[in-house]
Amino acid sequence: MAQVNRVLWHGDCLQTAALMERGSVDLVYFDPPFMTGKERHGTRQEFVFDDQWQGDLASFLPWLQKRIAAVIPLVSRHGSLIVHLDHRTIHYVKVWLDQHLGVKTFVNEIIWHYTGGGRSRSRFSCKHDTLLWYAPHGKPFFNPDPVRQPYLKSSGYARSGIRSANGKRYLPDPRGTPPDDVWNIPIINPMSSERVGWPTQKPLALLERLILALTEPQALVADFMCGSGTTLVAAAVHGRRWVGGDRSPEALRCAQTRLAACCKAQIEVLACDTMNDTKIPKEDDENV
């Protein structure tokens, strides 16, 4: 079976997931629309998508659940599924995933806290998203060492270590401390060279932390609602294989440009119906 890698597909998540082989993906990052009820606009006229849902939750949740269910079988034996949403729907999806996969497959609720933008005058401002981490097949790959952070200067542990009740002394790791489940990562500065103008562009730092901690080099990372391609760029930069897709031709053109510059190679965009019965092979298949 020929390898299909470093490819962008133009199509719905259901179509692209159907092209993948079961158990072939080490990290599925699932970042769907958030049901904001708005038409989302970027910095360019063509960077727009409609996030309005007739009937709100009654139409959005079945649509969302169907697509999450389509990507779950793709997760490899020690792989991970990350579902990224906000306060509007994350609680419904958490309950559904616990029922669908079993509560023991839940690993972490990661809070991405960010600053920037306006402040509400009627309530506490909403300045975080939630990432649900599930391991559908049990214990997932996890290595926090590449994403360790410096100890805070105010940390007594960093200065002198700690001593346990039995007298054993634990010194701080010179590489820093692993992140906890609240990640303070800024949104992309409007003046940043990283900014491409897609309305829901995520910072590279967010995806890099996930990819470095949850996958090994040459692992396969998939994002079937890739938008401007941040997940795929982060994967490529750090030596992971990747596949992506989106329904928006404008998003795919943006992702294609970023990836071509990153990979220093031509990146194909394929229509799902051109793939016929071809599936992406597992890493141990021939020619991988």
Image (cartoon, helix red, strand yellow):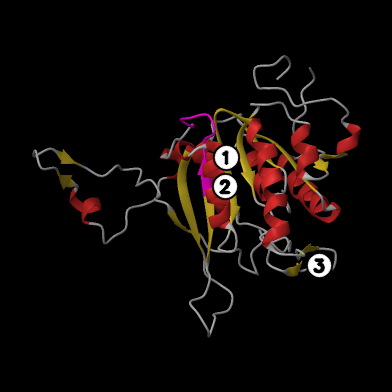
Q: Amino acid at mark 2?
A: Trp
- For label 1, the residue is 100
> Is 97 situated left or right of 288 in this image?
left
Locate the N terminus and report the quarter of the image it occupies.
top right
Instruction: Say whether marks 2 and 1 touch (CB < 8 Å).
Output: yes
CA gap, disc 1 and disc 3: 39 Å
Q: Where residue 71 is drawn, which disc sits there? A: none
State whether residue 132 appears in this view. Answer: yes
CA gap, disc 2 and disc 1: 6 Å
Say if the magenta span includes residue 137.
Answer: yes
Magenta highlight range: 132-140
Q: Residue at x 71, y 44 (%)?
A: 67
> Is 25 situated left or right of 102 in this image?
right
Give residue 270's position: percent from left, percent from top: 86, 38
Q: Amino acid at mark 1?
A: His
- For label 2, the residue is 96
Q: Mark 2 or 3 closer to N-term? A: 3
Say if the magenta span includes residue 81.
Answer: no
- For label 3, the residue is 44
- Specify the farthest residue to the right: 274
How many other residues sit within 10 Å of disc 3, few (<14), some (14-19) or many (≥20)? few
Q: Nearer the viewer, mark 2 or mark 3?
A: 2
> Is 158 situated left or right of 216 in this image?
left
Q: Main SS of the magenta segment?
A: loop
